[in-house]
Image (cartoon, rainbow, N blue to C red):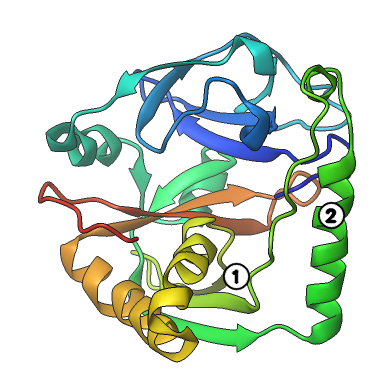
Amino acid sequence: MPGAKHGETVCCAGVTREGQWRRQYPIPFRRLKEKFDRWEWIEYKYKLPDPSQDKRTESRRVQENTIFPKGKIKESEKSRFLEKVIVPSTRHASELGMSLALVRPRNIKLKIIKKKPEELKEESDHYKEVGRQRGLFDSRDGQELKSITPCPYKFIFSWTDAEGKSHQNISEDWEIPAMFHNLCPKYGEKEVLKTIRLRFEEEYPKRGVVFAMGTHSRWSDTWLLIGIIRLNETEQDSLF
């Protein structure tokens, strides 16, 4: 999501080969020369954040020009690799002092809510503004990025964890809006929303899915749904 302080940036969560969580920020993803995908190893140089701004031990301040993709993890290794970092609940993660966690959701239900016109306008105006911002890296090409079109819907997941506690989270995962925007021109809004509901309520739970959860920088007891990850060793269907 674009940040007011650092322009159009994203915060990326990842896991090291040793199973340690990393929160990488700020990353101006659309402007990177060396882009990377989900499930891809990366190397980069970083600094630790100012404790007065971010006390979370997993956080790293990434130097964007030092990011280098190093190849993807094998399909057959994905589930086994992430299995070791899955925890039963965010409560359990908090007790361990973690601010990032993978949790297996149960009883997933998806609520799809249309955003109000004023919400869409605010998002659209913000995307346009950050697209015009210039940083040191931006000035090299002198070109303005095409502004992002906000998704007109919110996707809210209700679910329970392994301890039986119920949760409700707005999805911050970029793949659902991407799926919506990519499929709508071909199939229409109504059919795409139906497909999204089927995929996340039925298909993913049957094949294996985990929620990537992360705490808010200001409120350590507030957990956000930052990613929805398929965990299975069969060939993954193409979303787009």
- Where is mark 2, residue-wise? 128
CA separation, marks 2 and 1? 23 Å
Say which of 8 and 141 sits in front. 141
Callout 2–callout 1 Cβ contact below 8 Å: no
- Please give the label number shown on residue 170: 1
Nearer-the-camera pick, 145 or 65: 145
The disc labelled 2 sits on which kind of residue?
Lys
Q: Secondary structure at mark 2?
A: helix
| Vertical comparison of 195 with 6: above or below | below
Q: Is residue 232 visible?
A: yes
- Tell me how many marks there are: 2
Q: Secondary structure at mark 1?
A: strand
* The C terminus sits in image quarter: bottom left
In the rendered structure, which amino acid carries the disc numbered 1?
A: Ile
Residue at image coords 54%, 42%: 100
> Where residue 168 sits: x, y (%)?
55, 75
Counting from the top left corner in percent of width and height, residue 137 is at 78, 19
Q: Position of residue 198 (x, y in %)?
A: 30, 81
Upstream in sequence: badge 2 or badge 1 = 2
